[in-house]
Image: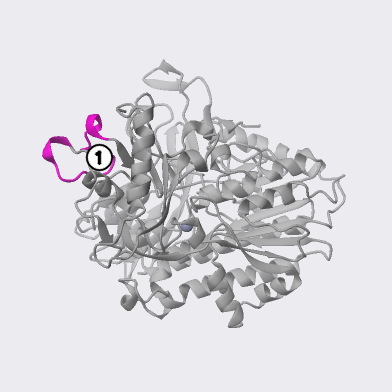
Amino acid sequence: MMTAARRRFCTMSGHLRRLILPVFFLLASCGQSKPPVDQRLIILGFDGMDPVLLRQWMDAGSLPNFQKLAAMGGFQSLATSNPPQSPVAWSDFATGTGPGEHGIYDFLRRDPVSYLPDFSISRVIPPQRFLSLFGMKLPMEDGEIINRRLGTPFWSMVENNGGRSTVLRVPVTFPPDPIHRMMAGMGVPDLLGTQGTYTIYSTRPPVSSTSSGSRSVRMRPDSTGHIASLLEGPTHPLKPDGPPLSSQLLLDPAGEKVRIRLGDADIQLSEGEWSDWITVNFDYFGPASVSGIVRVYLLSSYPRVQLYVSPINIDPREPVVPLSYPAGYAAELEARFGLYHTIGMPEETWSLNEGHLTDHAFLEVVQTTLKEQEDQFYDALERHDSDVVVSVFVQTDRVSHMFYRGIDPLHPLYTDTDDQARDAIHWIYREADRVLGETMQRMNPDDSLIVLSDHGFAPFRRAVNVNRWLADQGLLALENGKLESTAGFASVDWSRTRAYALGLNSLYINRSGREAGGIVGEAEAARIKQQIIASLSQLQDPQTGEAVIREVFDGAVLYPGNANGDAPDIIIGYEAAFRASWHTTLGGVPASLIDDNNSKWSGDHCISPEAVPGVLLTSFKLNAPIDSIRGIAAYAGQYRKNSR
Ligand SMILES: [Zn+2]
């Protein structure tokens, strides 16, 4: 069934929920009368776990639980999706189908009308109808959230067969599916509706020009050092055209420390210290408010104060959008284990990449998210009430992205890394091993365990500006003799452009009747596509003569069905060490063709799928081979030994 998951949400229901939640818990506990399930299928995902690194550290003896599991059932590499990106691969995993059927082709899709990048995983549509009254706009309908992934995930098949599923933080599960229990993962926005916007407060001029994921606020202390500033929050629900809601932020010197007053917190932090969670209520009408949670990190103390404020996570106690199913599950977890990150991508990768956080501060966040998810996962295992339990830990992927420079002697930053950075990936694999051990301890003798990753990892040393290549080939034209363009194709002349690249592996033909400024008809499109596939496949790095690309794929061949209509015309499968540049992902056209990757984001997997397979380990011998991540769903969807 090709339907997108849609959920309605109400923007003003916080107070109502507070009244309803206790009743809900009562009803939920009444419904749990089934006997405990003792033959479960447990699926433990480690995003980005690489078979070569895993084998190397298993052989070295530092991953005893992986060794134990491999001896019980088996250990093999697992073919990934094409392209090998997490949202694509986990959608293959969930549905047992490819992108042509589930509709997720890349982290980013392009809007064929504006040519601008758009998040391809989920979409939040605010209320469209309002009643204007006393200068306010009262929403006359609920907003809507759409998971762009189509098809039926295996956890729903399990339930259709009479079983129960618990699914925790699997990417592309927002809004959560109506199953026994689900906590949404990648796709959940922050309170601003973005995928994670952090804020840097500084008495100095902004550190660097703000990227789309960050805000920079200049602070001006008075003669005592006192600083009064504001944390800007979400749009005013009743005045969507007015200024955003905000909350006061006060800083004062406190010896070596800094006193920070924000939301419900009055705390003192030392340099290099994270706060606990702070609840910030953004008031908008009488007692009505929107609640968010943040953590702050003191980058530097007086006289040159710099404070980092994390993305404003949606408060699981009063979520403005559904974070879990049932809706009250998110609050129930908070009541048991305390506040936790709710945003879909909580690890602060971009702030580390931009130099706004240190390696150490980043790794502390990883430790925190790991602990939060472990609490939730072990709790789900200890309930013994689901036939299938799935949890995906993404920390392995995030640490591998940011610290590949520590294990790749050819990366430009290799010589700058310290001991902690060099050990970081090995450390997160040891942590994964510990999580695996904890999981095995909680298994019944008749439980089955699958451990898998969605893809492996490769070095990322050289960044390819695909739109520069297209311009050099005469396929992409810039306005009035300009030589380059900023993101969003700002200076591209669409009336003379035949092809453009956007996203991590995607390339599109500027088709008439499809793109707003399309000029290429059907017959010419086929010819241009073959021309690009043939010549891009031959691309060499001008610096070294190395082959840049392993294979260029025809989207029409890869994606029969073209679900969502979003299928790229061409998918680029880079060789290891190369990847699309950040300019390419956002539709920029720089002057150079290939640049050194001098940033901490030093490992990647958005390349040829053959170069980055994932892993599969099982606690049992497989009856039939599972060769690719797409094969898990057929096995897991039929798992209902204990269904009653
Ligand atoms: Zn990744």
Can residue 617 be seen from the camera position used here?
A: yes
- Residue at the bottom extreme of this rendering: 60
**Label 1 neighbourhood size at 10 Å, few (<14), some (14-19), many (20+)?**
many
Magenta portion: prevailing SS class: loop
- What residue sits 59% from the left and 60% below the top? 453
Residue 361: x and y, percent? 41, 67
Pick the residue in front: 94 or 537.
537
Residue 113: x and y, percent? 35, 28
Determine which residue is flagged by label 1.
476
Locate the N terminus by quadrant.
top right
Q: Quadrant of residue 97?
A: top right
**Mark 1 vs ligand 1: CB below 8 Å:** no
Q: Quadrant of residue 601?
A: bottom left
- What residue sits 48% from the left and 62% below the top? 611
Placement of 314 over or under 135, stated as above or below: below
- What residue sits 36% from the left and 33% below the top? 525
Q: Is residue 420 left or right of residue 68?
A: left
Q: Is residue 65 left or right of residue 107?
A: right
Q: Quadrant of residue 379?
A: bottom right
In the image, the segment drawn in magenta is 479-497
Pick the residue in front: 357 or 489.
489
Q: What coloring was used for the rendering?
A: one colour
- Residue at the left extreme of this rendering: 481
Q: Secondary structure at mark 1?
A: loop
Residue 295: x and y, percent? 44, 57
Locate the C terminus by quadrant.
top right
Placement of 82 over or under 27, stated as above or below: below
Q: Is residue 491 magenta?
A: yes
- Amino acid type, mark 1: Leu
Can residue 356 be seen from the camera position used here?
A: no
